[in-house]
């Protein structure tokens, strides 16, 4: 959890990245560039509810102040319920849309003269590999 706040802050740097991709790739294929921008932003926005960092900090503070076992049990239950959001639907949307957005932008980069082919192919291969992390193991 200690790195999640940094992860969230790091994702904010993707906002200018998606804007630059849109501006530079819209001449290659405007509808695909809009798709990159929209899916990228929706993916970024969905990260916020999937990382209840401040809620967990507040529960931790409440746990420190708890004076009875019953209060501690209630706070632990709330903590477990809140922690379940970390890999919930919003996180999956963030992961899938963000990766798809970067795959599409890499494909557009291949067709765009502003980017080198090496950069485009590295982005494509990297994001396809990242996406395979999401595919569940078969039979496991």
Image (cartoon, rainbow, N blue to C red):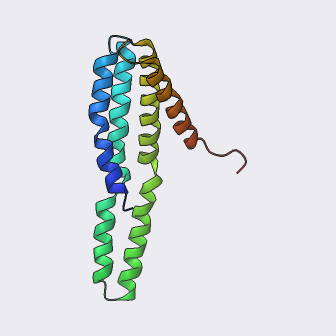
Question: x, y percentage for residue 89?
Answer: 45, 47
Q: In this picture, is 8 found above or below 118?
A: below
The residue lying at 47 percent from left, 20 percent from top is 107
Picture coordinates of residue 126 (x, y %)? Answer: 51, 33
Side (left or right) of 20 relative to 117: left
Compare residues 19 and 73 and report the one nearer the observer.
19
Q: Relative to 10, is 73 above or below? A: below
Q: Residue at x 28, y 35 (%)?
A: 15
Q: Looking at the image, which is closer to me, 73 or 99?
A: 99
As drawn, is 94 to the left or to the right of 131?
A: left
**Residue farthest to the right, as pictured:** 139
The residue positioned 30% from the left and 67% from the top of the image is: 57
For this rendering, which residue is in front, 8 or 88? 8
Which part of the image, by quadrant, shows the N terminus?
A: bottom left
Q: Quadrant of residue 52?
A: bottom left
Above-or-below relation of 110 to 85: above
Q: Is residue 34 above or below residue 83?
A: above
């Amino acid at each position: 959890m200690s790195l999640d706040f940094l992860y969230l802050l790091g994702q904010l740097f993707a906002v200018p990245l998606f804007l630059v991709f849109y501006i530079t790739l819209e001449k290659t294929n405007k509808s695909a560039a809009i798709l990159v921008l929209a899916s990228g932003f929706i993916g970024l926005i969905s990260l916020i509810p999937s990382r209840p960092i401040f809620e967990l900090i507040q529960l931790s503070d409440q746990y420190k102040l708890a004076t009875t076992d019953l209060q501690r049990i209630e706070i632990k239950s709330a903590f477990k319920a809140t922690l379940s959001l970390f890999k919930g639907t919003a996180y999956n949307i963030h992961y899938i849309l963000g990766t798809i957005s970067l795959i599409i932008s890499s494909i557009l980069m291949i067709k765009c003269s502003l980017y080198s082919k090496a950069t485009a192919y590295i982005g494509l291969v990297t994001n396809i590999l990242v996406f395979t992390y999401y595919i569940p193991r078969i039979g496991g």
